[in-house]
Amino acid sequence: MRTVSLSYAGHEEPHFLEACNLCSKSLGHNTDIFMYRGNTPFCSQECRQEQIGIDEAIERKCRRVSKKSTSEISKKSSTIQTETLVA
């Protein structure tokens, strides 16, 4: 089996369908490849599902942080007082 590599600026990268994105297991010819989010290959449904779970956990954490930041900003903006000075 011949490995296809991409070469740029003297640096070689393996083809993106050469190994599982999660466990790095080699993806051979005539085997199923399980794709996720466009061009991310996995050797099994289990590896793909584990990555989906990781991504969902990261997205939930980002949403919590974003909501917390938004509520802190609105609290700060509601405590700003403005006064008018008449001369």
Image (spheres, grey):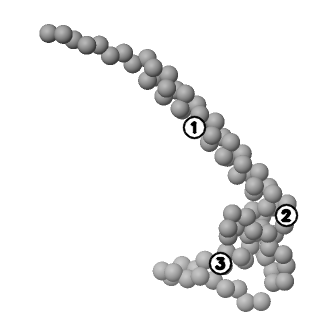
Residue 14 marker: 3
The number of numbered discs placed on residues in the rendered structure image is 3
Which amino acid type is marked by label 2?
Answer: Gln
The part of the image, by quadrant, that contains residue 78 is top left
- Residue that label 1 marks: 66
Name the residue: 77% across, 51% down.
53
Q: Position of residue 47 (x, y in %)?
A: 81, 61
Front disc: 2 or 3 = 2
Q: Residues within 10 Å of mark 1 (few under 14, many from 20)?
A: few
Q: Residue at x 61, y 77 (%)?
A: 13
Relative to 55, does residue 37 appear above or below in the rendering? below
Q: Amino acid at mark 1?
A: Ser
- In the rendering, at what x and y percent does residue 64 appear? 64, 36
What's the residue at 59%, 82% (across, down)? 6
The residue tagged 2 is: 45
Residues packed near mark 3 inside 10 Å, few (<14), some (14 to 19) or many (20 plus)? few
Instruction: Answer left or right for 64 relative to 73.
Output: right
Callout 2 touching callout 3 (CB < 8 Å): no
| Camera-side mark, 1 or 3 | 1
Please state if 67 lies on the left or on the right of 82 as rendered.
right
Please name the residue shown 72% across and 45% down the image: 57
Q: Is 53 in front, or is 80?
A: 80
Q: Height in image: 54 above or below 35?
A: above
Q: In front here: 78 or 66?
A: 78
